[in-house]
């Protein structure tokens, strides 16, 4: 079924490419149109550094000034008119301005080829934007991550997925997918996305993080039933999972703008693929965003009902993001994961400064 779906997408977009490549509205060749339009390459990025005080279990707290796991970015993007369709490119690298490594600061050794690179690829892809949507190849953020991802602290030390507040990892609200094909389209209030792993390189320290046959998809509806209401569903599937049919993470999500300066959100995840900060089970996350002038307060509660009862937990987070300008913000807050039974509680006080350009 998934192979058929992928084939249909390729055939439909190929037909559009063939039509657009051989015909233009003004009678000129598509090559001439493209040359006139140019590539329009744009550079973008962000710098992030923060202070973190983190305690795990009964161990002494650890104080750090760092950019954990390459949260600073530098990238290029472009969109070139080819006459009826557009070629779209995006490449983005991650790095750490505090200690010079792109991997997580918790790693004590470079166990893989990518662990301690100064600069590491975050995503990179090329594709075509057509009347049927976008289709491209490369590395991408999964629709399971991007759809229904409401954590405003995702790129700071306070991130919920670092404390069990949401799923994490490549099949959760965390990593990216290497060597994949991606399709994305928006039709009125509906947005759909599908991604499929296409790599056979699954061995060694520099292998792809997803394999051929892994897939993810999502569907989101916005302002359809009520103004300010968004809801949807996403799935991430590991073909090589423990069962004969593989294993999956499933997510239902919704958000609602209660008033101009206040919104609420909720996600319900059914987890079969364990992550770094959670086991298999259910994660329910609810929260609110409240804006006062240049300040945005986020308040979140999450409950992890794991398959192993002794690893159940509750996560609480409160933070304030101060927008110092259109490009710069300062966030301060606390996120705490309290474990019921065995396991270590995790508490993080954090302060992070971000500048985007």
Image (cartoon, rainbow, N blue to C red):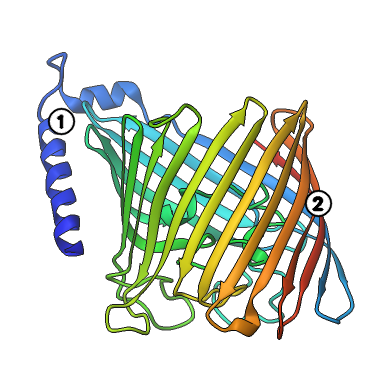
Name the front one of labels 2 and 1. 2
Q: Residue furthest top?
A: 26
Q: Which quarter of the figure is the C terminus placed in?
A: top right
- Do the residues under discs 2 and 1 have CB atoms within 8 angstroms? no
**Residue 168 can be seen, yes or no:** no
User: Mark 2 or mark 1: which comes first in sequence?
Assistant: 1
**Nearest to the observer: residue 325 or residue 70:** 325
Residue at the (49%, 80%) spot, across then down: 205
The numbered mark at residue 20 is: 1
In the picture shown, does residue 192 fall above or below 173? above
Front-most of residues 268 and 77? 268
Q: Which structural element holds mark 2?
A: strand
Can the viewer see residue 53?
yes
Q: Image point 36% across, 27% down: which residue?
A: 38
Residue drawn at point x = 16 percent, y = 38 percent: 17
In the image: residue 299, left or right of residue 32: right
Q: In the rendered image of this protein, does residue 343 appear above or below residue 195?
A: below
Q: Which mark is residue 333?
A: 2
Q: Quadrant of residue 311?
A: bottom right
Q: Residue at x 41, y 53 (%)?
A: 143
**Above-or-below relation of 221 to 166:** above
Which part of the image, by quadrant, shows the N terminus? bottom left
Determine the image quadrant of residue 226.
Answer: top left
| Res 2 → quadrant | bottom left
In the image, residue 170 sits, relative to residue 131, either above or below, namely below
């Amino acid at each position: 079924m998934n192979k058929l779906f992928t084939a249909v997408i390729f055939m439909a977009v190929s037909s559009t490419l063939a039509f657009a490549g051989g015909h233009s509205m003004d009678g000129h060749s598509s090559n001439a149109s493209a040359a006139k339009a140019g590539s329009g390459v744009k550079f973008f990025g962000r710098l992030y550094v923060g202070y973190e005080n983190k305690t795990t279990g009964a161990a002494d707290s650890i104080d750090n000034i760092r950019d954990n796991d390459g949260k600073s970015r530098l990238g290029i993007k472009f969109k070139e008119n080819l006459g009826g369709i557009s070629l779209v490119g995006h490449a983005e690298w991650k790095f750490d301005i505090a200690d010079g490594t792109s991997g997580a600061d918790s790693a004590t050794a470079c166990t893989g080829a990518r662990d301690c690179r100064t600069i590491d690829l975050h995503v990179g892809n090329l594709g075509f934007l057509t009347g049927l949507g976008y289709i491209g190849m490369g590395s991408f953020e999964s629709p399971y991550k991007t759809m229904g991802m409401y954590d405003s602290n995702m790129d700071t030390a306070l991130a919920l997925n670092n404390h069990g507040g949401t799923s994490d990892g490549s099949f959760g609200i965390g990593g990216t997918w290497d060597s994949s094909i991606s399709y994305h389209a928006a039709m009125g209030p509906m947005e759909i996305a599908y991604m499929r792993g296409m790599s056979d390189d699954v061995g060694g320290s520099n292998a792809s993080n997803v394999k051929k046959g892994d897939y993810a998809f999502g569907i989101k509806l916005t302002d359809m039933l009520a103004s300010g209401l968004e809801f949807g569903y996403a799935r991430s599937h590991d073909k090589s999972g423990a069962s004969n049919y593989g294993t999956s993470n499933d997510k239902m999500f919704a958000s609602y703008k209660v008033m101009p300066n206040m919104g609420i959100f909720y996600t319900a995840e059914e987890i079969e693929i364990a992550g770094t900060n959670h086991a298999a089970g259910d994660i329910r996350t609810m929260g609110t965003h409240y804006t006062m002038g240049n300040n945005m307060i986020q308040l979140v509660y999450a409950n992890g009902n794991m398959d192993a009862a002794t690893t159940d937990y509750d996560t609480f987070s409160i933070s304030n993001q101060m927008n110092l300008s259109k490009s710069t913000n300062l966030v301060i807050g606390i996120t705490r994961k309290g474990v019921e039974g065995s396991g270590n509680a995790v508490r993080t006080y954090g302060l992070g400064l971000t500048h985007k350009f």
